[in-house]
Image (cartoon, grey):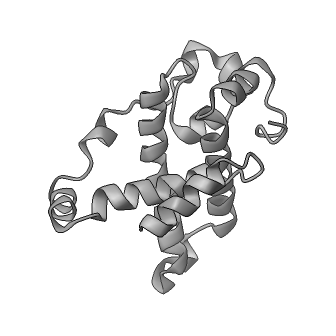
Amino acid sequence: MRAWYQKMIQATSDVTKIDAIGKFFYVMLAGYVFGNEETKKKYDKDGDPIISRVSSTIKYKDPEFYKNHCLYEVAGAQKDDDYEHLTNALKKSVYRVLQDQRNRYTKQLVQLVDVEAAEHFKWLWFCACHILTNKTRRYQYDTAKDTNYGFHL
């Protein structure tokens, strides 16, 4: 786990590795939940209480903005969220990415999973992590129209 953590720290400093921050979230979440027997038992019993307090994207507040900025919806965040709220929203949405991956590798469920849609959501989620967790990239994304899911940042 420590080796993976160090590898992710190095990868997140490279701006060309768009999936690095998302993979860091995987490691962070896994370490937090399964890092020791006590936290695993607590998670198995109670789930993640922070997740239930995260609100989804409220598009009616600024429909024109959200129409052109889909990464907020992928993250389940709002444009005025601070870093803590945004991180919790991304943490909530990572469960969908992980469940899609798990379903993809589970033989009996593979027919039920739209693999292409799951992969597309995963890539958009990686982009959301990359763009929305960086103050400069987030500002650039917010002030421009999102014509290519933020790939220009």
Judge from the rendering whether residue 115 lies leftward or rightward of residue 44; answer left or right: right
Q: Nearer the viewer, residue 15 or 132?
A: 15
Judge from the rendering whether residue 1 lies leftward or rightward of residue 45; answer left or right: right
How many numbered markers are drawn? 0
Report the residue at 69% width, 21% height from top. Answer: 139
The outermost residue toward the bottom is 107
Judge from the rendering whether residue 5 lies leftward or rightward of residue 129; answer left or right: left
Q: Position of residue 58 (x, y in %)?
A: 51, 23
Q: Nearer the viewer, residue 106 or 31?
A: 31
Instruction: Locate residue 49: give its quadrant.
Output: top left
- Say above or below: 81 vs 51: above
Q: In which quadrant is the N terminus drawn?
A: bottom left
- Say above or below: 39 vs 106: above
Q: Position of residue 24 (x, y in %)?
A: 52, 54
Instruction: Locate residue 122: give its quadrant.
Output: bottom right
- Say above or below: 79 vs 120: above
Q: Position of residue 35 (x, y in %)?
A: 28, 63
Q: In which quadrant is the C terminus drawn?
A: top right
The outermost residue toward the top is 61
Report the residue at 22% width, 64% height from top. Answer: 40
Report the residue at 72% width, 49% height from top. Answer: 14
Instruction: Locate residue 71: give its quadrant.
Output: top right
Q: Nearer the viewer, residue 146 or 115?
A: 146
Judge from the rendering whether residue 126 lies leftward or rightward of residue 151; answer left or right: left
